[in-house]
Image (tube, coloured by chain):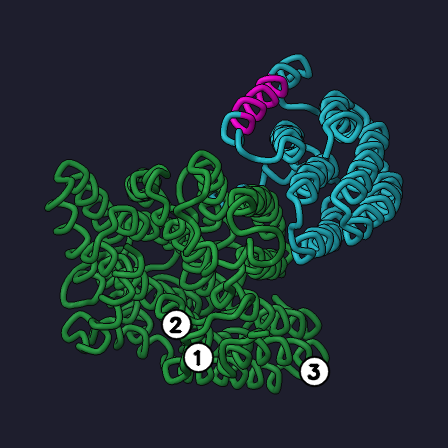
Chain colours: A cyan, B green
Amino acid sequence: MGHGLTFDVAHLLAGGLVLVSFLMLTQHRLYALLNAFALQAVLLSLSVTWQANVQNAPHLYVTALIALVFKAIIIPVGLHRIIQRLGIHREIETVIGSGTTMLAGMGLVALSMTVMLKVTPTADPLAREDLAFALSVVLLGLLMMVTRRNAVSQVVGFMSLENGLVLAGTGARGMPLVVEISVAFSILIAFFVIGVFLFRIRERFDTVDLQALDRFRGERR
Amino acid sequence: MMFLASDGVLAILVIPVVAAAILSLLPGYRISARLNVLASALTFAASLSLFFADHTEPGRYLFVDDLNIAFIVLNTFIGFTTSVFSASYIGHELKTGRLTPTYLRFYHAMYQAMMGGMNLALTANNIGLIWVGIELATLTTVLMVGIYRTHEALEAAWKYFILASVGIGLALFGTILVYMAALPVVGEGVNGMVWTVLLTQAAHFDPALINVAFIFLLLGYGTKVGLAPLHAWLPDAHAEGPTPISAVLSGLLLNVALYAVLRFKILLAANPSAVASGPLLMLLGLVSLVFAAFMLYRRRDIKRLFAYSSIEHMGIIAFAFGMGGPVANFAGLLHMAMHSLTKSGIFFAVGHVTQVKGTQKVADIRGLTETHPWLGWSLVIGVVAIAGLPPFGVFMSEFLVISSAFAREPWLALLVVLGILLALGALFYHLNGIAFGEPTGSTSPSDASYVPMIVHFGLVLTAGIFLPPMLVAWFRHVADILG
C-alpha cells in the first residue's frame, strides 16, 4: 500500500471534484451549469473506479457505472430537455454576487479541510483526504442550493451534494453495498420527485422560479 | 445467518409493503380506504406480538429491543387510528372535488409506504438501514404534502423536499463518519454498521471522529425532528397537506427522527472520551421551545398554529432526553407518547372542523361549541390537554420534565417554564375565539367519525389520572437504556 501513485491519482480526482464544484458555483447559465455537473459526474465515476481498483472492491465498479450512466448522461440530458421545454435558458438569478459566493465557498473548503484532517489522524491517509474533499463537495453543493433561486439549479446543487456523499461512501474502505445502492436509489427517486414537481410547477405557473412560489406564503391570504 | 429477529418484525414490514402494492392497483375509494384501515390494524396487531417474541439475539439488519418496541407500538397504533380518521376525511375531500380518485389511489399507497418506511427505521439494527427507512418515509410524505397541487401546497412540498434532502444528506455523511470511526476497531464489512456491534466497541472509537459524526447526525436528523432553527419546512408541510398527513407527521415522523438521534446519542455515551451529547440536544430543545412559544401568538392558520405547537413539544422532549438520567428520560418518553396521542387527536378534530367550515383561517372559525358541539368540545379538550393542564397526561410529563430540570439546572428550568406558559397563553388566546366566539360560517352537521379522537383523548386522560404500573416499569427500563 505505497503512497506514491495510488495516493496522487485519488487526490487528483477528488480534488477535481471540488474544483468543478467551484466551477458550478460561478456558472450563470443553466446549460453551462448542467455541463459542469456532467463533468463532475464523470470525475466522480473515475474516482470511484480508482477506489474500486485500489481497494480491490469490484462492487464499486457498479457504483462508478451508475454515476457515469445516470448522473453524467441521463440526468443532464433530461434536465436539458426540461429547460428547453420550459424555455428558461436565460441567466440564473443569484441571491448574492458570485464574488461573495466564491469567498464563502473557499471558507467552507478551508473549514472542511481543517475539521476532517484534524479529527482523522488515525484513519487510513487515503480515506482521510478523500473524506475532506467529500465534505467540501457536500458543503459547496449546500451553498449552491442556498444561493440559487431557480428550481433547476437547486436540483443540480442537491445532486452535486449527493456526489460528495458517494465520494465519501466509496472512500470508506469496505463500506457495505447497501449504502451505495441506497444512494443511487435515492437519486432516482429524487429525480422522479423533482420531475413531478417541475412538471406540475410548469403546468400551474409557467415558471420554475422559486421566487414566484415565495409570493404565495401561507400566512398571507 | 440471523437475518430476522422474529416473525412479528417481518410482519410489520411486509404488511405495509404488500398493502401499498395492492392499494396502488385498487380503483374504488371505499374499498381502498377500508383496506388501508385493515392493513394498519394488522400492522398494529403484529407490533403487539413483539411484546411476546423473544428478542435476545439481534440480527445484523433488524432487531427488537425494549427501546424500539415502545416506539413501534406507538407508531403503529397512531398509524391505525389515523387511517380510520383518514377514511372519513378523504370521503369528504372526494365529495368536494379537492381530490380525484386517481390521486386517492396514490394517497393510500403512499400512506402504507410511509408506514413501512417508518417501521423499517425503527426496527433497523443497521445505521445505514435506519437512514434508508427515514429517507423513504420522508419522500412519501413530500409527495403527499403536495397532493392538492395548489400554489401553497407546491411551495410547501418543495420547501420540505429541499430542506429534508439537505438534512438527509448530512445524516448520511454522519453515518459514513461513524463507519469510518468503527473501521479500525470493528473491521471492514457489514459489522461496521450494525448498531449493537458498534455499541459494544464504541469505547475504542476515535473520540474526535465520532464527535464530528454526531454533529452531522444531529443536524441531519434534527431537521426531521423540526428543531429550531432547522424547522422551516414543518409549518408549511403541516398546513398545506391533507390533515391525516399533518397528524402522522406530528405524531409519528418527528418521533422516528428523534429515535434515530437517540440511538446515536447512546452510541456516543458509550465512549468515555467523546463529548457529552446532552447539552447540544438541550440547547436545540430550549431554542425550539421558546421560539415556537412566541411564534404561536400571531398564527392565522389553524393547522399552522398546531404545527408550531409540535415544534414546541419536540423542543421539550429533546430537552428532556438531552438532560438524561432516569427521571428526565422517563419524562421525555412519557411526553413523547402523550404529545403524539394528543396532537394527532387535535389534528383529527381540526381536519373535520376545516371541512365543515371550509376554511383554515382562525379568524373565520368562531363559536364552534355552539355550531358543532362535539367537534368544538373535543377541540377544547385537546387544547387543554396539549397546553399541559391537569388532569391530562401531558401535565404529568411536563411536570416531571420541569421538576427534574429544577433539581439539576434551575436556570434552564425557568426557561422551560417560561416557554410552556407562553405557549399556554397563546393557545388559550386562540381557543377562546375558536370555541366560544360569536358563531360564524356553516352550521351544517358534520359527518365526522369521532371514535379515533375520543380514543386518543381518552388515553391521554387515563394516563393523566392513572398510569398502569406495567407501563411505568417498562418506561423506567427504557429510560435506563437511554442512560
Marks 2/1: CA–CA distance: 8 Å
Q: Which of the two labelled residues, at mark 3 and mark 1, occupies the earlier sequence position? A: 3
State the separation of the CA atoms marked 2 and 3: 32 Å
Horizontal and vertical percent for residue B132? 60, 58
Badge number at residue B18: none
Does the residue at mark 2 contact the one at mark 1 (Cβ under 8 Å)?
yes
To which residue does mark 3 refer? B26
Which of B160/A21 is in front? A21
In the rendered image, the vertical position of residue B101 relative to residue A179, given as above or below: below
Give the chain letter at badge 3: B
x%, y% of residue A68? Answer: 85, 44
**Residue at x 25% of width, y 67% of height:** B477
Task: Please report whichever mark, 2 or 1, sits nearer to the chain's N-terminal start.
Answer: 1
> Does mark 3 fall on the same chain as mark 2?
yes
For mark 1, what is the residue? B47
Q: Is mark 2 on a helix, strand or loop?
A: helix
